[in-house]
Image: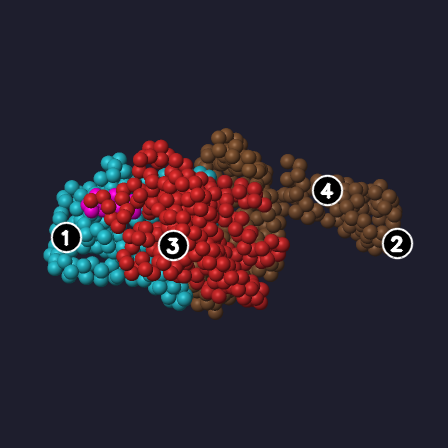
Chain colours: A red, B cyan, C brown
Amino acid sequence: MFLLHSQYVFAERGRSFIWFLYSVIPPAIFLLFWIGALKSQGGNIAGWNLSTITTYYFLLTIASSMLVAHIEEDIAWEDIQEGHLTGYLLKPFSYYWIKFLEEVPWRLLQGSYGIVLIFAFIVIFGNFFTLSNNPLVIALSLLICLLAFMLSFTFKTVLGLLAFWLTDTNGLFQLSDAVVQIFGGFIVPITLLPSLLQHTATFLPFAYMAYYPVVAIQGQLGISELAKVILFQVIWIVSFALLYKWLWIEGRKKYTAIGQ
Amino acid sequence: MKYFKIYKALLRVNFSYLTTYRSNMINGIIANSVWGFFSLLLIVILTSRTPSVFGWTRNELFLLFGIYNIVTSIFQFFFTRSFDRFSEIVNRGRLDSILLKPADSQFLMSLSYTNFTVLLRAFLGIGFIVYVLIQMHYIPTLIQVLFTLILMFASITVLYSIWYIVSTCLIWWPSLTNLVGLMYEINGTSRYPQEMYRSVSSLLFYAILPLTLIMTTPTQVLIGKVVFGNILLLISFAVVLFIISRLFWRYALRSYTSVG
Amino acid sequence: MSVISVQNLVKNYKAYKKEPGFFGAVKSLYSRNYELISAVSDVSFEIEEGELVGFIGPNGAGKTTTLKCLSGLLYPSRGKVNVLGFDPWKREDKFLKQISLIMGQKNQLWWDLPPIESFLLNKEIYGIPDKQFKETLLQLSELLDIEDVLNVQVRKLSLGQRMKCELVAAILHNPRVLFLDEPTIGLDVVMQKNLRDFIREFNGKYNSTVILTSHYMEDVKQLCKRVIIIDHGKLLFDGNLSDIIKKYATKKFIKVLFEKDVERKEIEKFGKIHAYKPAESIIAVNREDAPSVAAEMLKQFVIEDINIEEPDIEDVIRDVFTNK
């Protein structure tokens, strides 16, 4: 089943490449902006310099193409509203894990574009990159990345399930998109946000989806801070998973009652 | 005259659609308010720690984003819903239905669907610009405003032509349905000062030259920093790109009608 | 001057072939095989104003392709096409205002709005004057009995009502030539009949030229005097429906009702058995032999009823296709 889906994903590589470009262009533009801003501010803003900010945005490209799930539209529109959910209900596997396996090939494909890009740039602009070289830090950071994907995926499935109750999920998804962008560090690193927004970001799960994985790999966090991040990721994942469970049970009742 | 009547009828049909689907309309109002606000918030976030960059002051950057906001809102009012459906029309054989009508096919493809609620963003943009101008203690002359409007019209033409040319490619690559979505991102490159791109690489700058012009030029006129070369270029691009879009579309139709 | 003139029409396609499976997909990245398909090869015919002509052929025969060439949606690989004095492929406004193409179940009405809104939009696109628009709309809605649903959203209409409204939208501008591609596909028996009645009326009342393609014999039998048979892109026959039987039907059927049961092999002596029941049988015999065979059977058996019948036109045409 995985291979079949992978074949489908490979056939879609043209579209997949374009989706990859979606995740490249905004960080690239923000990076250009910061290069100019740093120049005008003497090379350092709030602890970020040219090389750390460049690394940040490059890693962000991979993060947004590889770690961020886009499953909410599929769940809400295809499965719930169009009724394909019925097909899944009949399968003997958990809906959550089937969707998980569906999402993974896309992320791998897009991540591979990103990794190629990064290697190309490391070769050309090697001295602009700052990554950690502590193996323990790297190991923990990779764990953080994995957890970030799980977090993003669970959060998006929860969003998608809301389609059981809302007929027009478009507005909600757009709002979620905007919020995730700001508080996930997709526009600027969290520490560069205006103070009010920065403060809010600490209470929200979005920073753990992209910002922390990126700065972790960059080596900006110490071991204890990394542990704290992992702890919070797990807490958020469990919370959303419970929320998912509850929504799934309630939603299924509603769905099968209507007989979509 | 005939096309004016046809467009009036199209507006009527679209407006009927808008009022028939209340929840869609409300959703559109919410989504557009969110995005309108968000896109203005973007420049506030980016410049919160930099009073000036690329030779533009913070206020001038605000104006640039405001103009971007207005131009894209008007562009979206007329065209984006039609562009969103472009691939559906080409792929599902509905292009035949359009080709059979005694009216220009490019006209019908571009203007059949109107997005009314996006005008909210235009109003937000206008409000924002007025606010910033007051903060700057700067009042543009009537002639400046007039010229700004004329240049904004040229900018919309440039945007439209580029989008149309890219969408026409769907005739040969029908699976690239997210190409249109990519255009939204590419649009986003235009809201930054030209200087940002020039400082990175002349090649990049010349590659996206039309895009860098469309927002910068009207803004420059508005704040009195007129660059005649830019004005000439913008208007030339508007004319040339529009002609190319028509010729390319005709060429694509020849190809389409040979295969069906 | 015929309304439609087709000379030596040829239309070819390239069809790309791909191997199935994951590795086939990868292979297609660097090597592409294609074959040339001849959708229409050397077809010629002329049609006069007011004719109601049927194109029959199996799926993929080239009927739809021919219609698309006639309406300007495809340009011919070779040959000349002239409709109403125009070259269809140029798609001039004056030409498009006089024709209409209705393809199966493809719809042009706006789904979420009442049909009247789509009609008004078409009015502007086709440049129909107010008075003519009102009159035509009145006539058509009476004829099709859709006056009550003009202001109901299309999505809320039944399939039959929707089909009628699509029809109105397509002919509101009083086209001189109407192309119908598989118009009855997917409709139930009642709707098929209604549609055929309407087409007949439309052709009679407005003297418009109608060309319809179908793979349902019933459509053609009911509506068309003249029939063009197309298969594998080639024109096999062009003439009256009744002539097909004379030209292609080599057999006649003798249907016999016996007073007493008769054994199979007794009947087999007279001809090929088409259907057998102990007291009732149908045999196929060569046309010329039919009367003499019938006479023989009357002598041999005690017969309650005997009938000499023409073969079903479907069977004739099926034979034409399977033999060619």
Distance between mark 3 and mark 4 Cα atoms: 83 Å
Mark 1 on the same chain as mark 2: no
Relative placement, left or right, of B36 versus C214 is left
Distance between mark 1 and mark 2 Cα atoms: 108 Å
Distance between mark 3 and mark 2 Cα atoms: 93 Å
Residue C267 at x, y percent in the picture: 84, 45
Question: What residue is drawn where x is 81% and y is 49%?
Answer: C276
Mark 3 on the same chain as mark 2: no
Which SS class for mark 2?
A: loop
To which residue does mark 3 refer?
A207
Residue C260 — which label? 2
Query: What segment is highlighted magenta in the picture?
Result: A29-41
To which residue does mark 1 refer?
B223
| Kind of residue indicated by mark 4 | Lys
Mark 3 on the same chain as mark 1: no
Distance between mark 2 and mark 4 Cα atoms: 27 Å
The chain containing the residue under callout 3 comes to A
To which residue does mark 4 refer?
C251
Of C180 and A63, the residue lying toward us: A63
Which SS class for mark 1?
A: helix
Asked if residue A30 shows in the view, the reply is yes
Q: Quadrant of the C terminus of chain C?
A: top right
Q: Is A17 above or below relative to A203? A: above
Question: What residue is drawn where x is 39% and y is 44%?
Answer: A217
| Kind of residue indicated by mark 1 | Ile
| Kind of residue indicated by mark 3 | Ala
Relative placement, left or right, of C104 versus C88 is right
Nearer mark to the viewer, of 1 and 4: 1
Question: Do callouts 3 and 4 mark residues in contact (Cβ within 8 Å)?
Answer: no
